Image: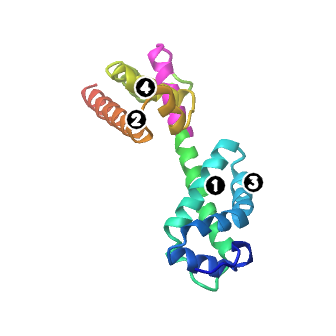
Amino acid sequence: MSTEPPSSLSDGDLVRRILSGEAHLFREILNRHQRGVWWIASATLGDRATCENLLQQAFVNAYEHLDQFRAGEDLGRWLRGIARNLVRMELRGAGRKDQLMARYHQAVLASLGEEDETGNDEQFARQKAMADCRQQLQPAANEALALRYEQGLSLDQVAARIGRSLGATRQLLFRARQVLKDCVTGRMANA
């Protein structure tokens, strides 16, 4: 083991030593490159909490896949590429969330007995079925759906609010969406 200070090592030397078992040196990579990764996230996403999560995830992904970094390449560029991919995934997820929020809004209108602006009878029937099916869910599932899709909270925030782990919350939402899908599909088929 070298006594050379980590700050004097090149990125390539750091990677090589980390891969050979000196995991503590990854801190130096984080110190050197977190600003560039932060810039990628904050320039696109804006939301501080989302950017912080993305920054952390980018470095977790980098550490887990450090063996895929090719010696001689620019480590900063590689890390920023990981961040860009995570930003793309986040934006896709946000787009899906916006679509789900719009659908949920329409379902709420249906539960209040109001037709949406388009006057589409099939869409109104689907929204009504969604509202009826929602009443059949367990209270915890309804609360999680409301927090996630009405209030737009992140999965982490929903998990904290309902007192469950992130994995359990993700599973609860998945199952609730599946139950709603099956219920609405059945009601629409019988309509």
> CA–CA distance between discs 2 and 4?
19 Å
- The secondary structure type at the circle numbered 4 is helix
Describe residue 67's horizontal placement relative to residue 2 as left or right. Answer: left
Which of the two discs, 3 and 2, labels the residue nearer the N terminus? 3
Tell me how far mark 3 sits from mark 1, CA to CA: 13 Å
Percent position of residue 141, x then y: 38, 27
Residue 28, horizontal then vertical, whole percent? 67, 67
Q: Quadrant of residue 95?
A: top right
Which callout, 1 or 4, points to the residue nearer the camera?
1
Q: What's the amino acid at mark 3? A: Ala
- Between residues 176 and 112, which one lies in front from this camera angle? 176
Residue 43: mark in rendering: 3
Magenta segment boundaries in residue numbering: 98-115
Please say if 23 is above or below 54: below
Residues at discs 1 and 2 in contact (Cβ within 8 Å): no
Q: What residue type is labelled 2?
A: Leu
Question: Where is residue 64 drawn, in percent x and y?
Answer: 49, 66
| Residue ID for mark 4 | 127
In the rendering, at what x and y percent does residue 71 appear? Answer: 59, 84
Which residue is the site of mark 2?
173
Cα distance in 3D space between marks 3 and 2: 30 Å
Q: Which residue is drawn at 54% across and 68% down?
A: 23
Q: Distance between the residues labelled 1 and 2?
A: 25 Å
Amino acid residing under circle 1: Leu
Q: Which residue is drawn at 63% across and 76% down?
A: 14
Label 1 belongs to which residue? 55
Tag 2 secondary structure: helix
Instruction: Give how far apart the Cα atoms at labels 3 and 4 are.
Output: 37 Å
Residue at point 53% right, 26% down? 105
SS for callout 3: helix
